[in-house]
Image (cartoon, helix red, strand yellow):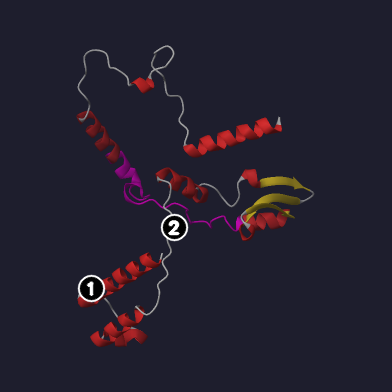
Amino acid sequence: MKVLSRVFRGKFIAGLKRAFRDGELSFPGSIRHLADEKAFHSFLRSLFRHDWVVYAKRPFGGPEHVLHYLARYTHRVAISNHRLVNVADGKVTFRWKDYARGSRQRTMAVGGEEFLRRFLLHVLPRGFVRIRFFGFLANRRRTQLLPLCQRLLEAISHQRLPAPQTGETKLPVSWLCPHCGGAMVLIEKFTAQEIRWKLAKASHFVDSS
């Protein structure tokens, strides 16, 4: 991280020098004196006397992981049903994650009115939206542009239709049944996360039985 910090500091300050030379920086108010070239370069030299902190983390596990992450915020409000433990005697009991103690699962019971108050804090006011579309999916032009895109895609698909092939098409070996040699039909696909979840659920069922 120290090496990354120094590299980032050097490239950032080099970018500042280039922007100053090209006249792309403005210095209003209390930093007006930095418009002077000597004062600006003196300021840049002072930046090298400090260690810069660079925050870096591992990248996402791919586009599918990003979609699952964003879906928690765009298609779910406040709390999911599986976190609700019990509703009785005017109180709602639910699970929550205690990040201060190693992300341990804990339970909390609050009154019904207090639960509704906390829940409604996550409901957007009238006129606000969670997802705002741009381009051909923007609300103002979607009615005109979406049919146009569909027509263009249909025209392209007709242009790229493959020529009819004579004879029988051979399937890859991986799509043939190892027992009878017949063609296998794809019924459903599971992601790695879904497979892990199903295996964990199955093992929990075996342990409990």
Using the image as rendered, state which of residue 83 and residue 12 is in the foreground. 12
Residue 18 numbered mark, or none: 1
Q: Is residue 164 above or below residue 136?
A: above
| Image quarter in which the C terminus is found | top right
Left or right, 206 with reference to 19:
right
Give the amino acid at mark 1: Arg
Which contiguous range is marked in magenta?
120-148
Where does the image place residue 147, in percent across and percent down from the top left? 31, 39
The residue depicted at 27 percent of the width and 76 percent of the height is 25
Query: Secondary structure under badge 1?
Result: helix
Looking at the image, is mark 1 or mark 2 nearer the viewer? 2
Q: Residue at x 47, y 36 (%)?
A: 191
Residue 137 highlighted magenta (yes or no): yes
**Residue farthest to the right?**
89
Earlier in the chain: of badge 1 and badge 2, it is 1
The answer to which image quadrant residue 47 occupies is bottom left
Q: Is residue 23 magenta?
A: no
Looking at the image, residue 194 lies above or below residue 91: above
* Quadrant in the picture for residue 99: bottom right
Percent coordinates x, y for residue 53 in the rendering? 42, 70
What is the secondary structure assignment of the residue under circle 2?
loop
Q: Residue at x 35, y 47 (%)?
A: 137
Report whether 105 appears left or right of 42.
Answer: right
Any mark on residue 176, and which?
A: none
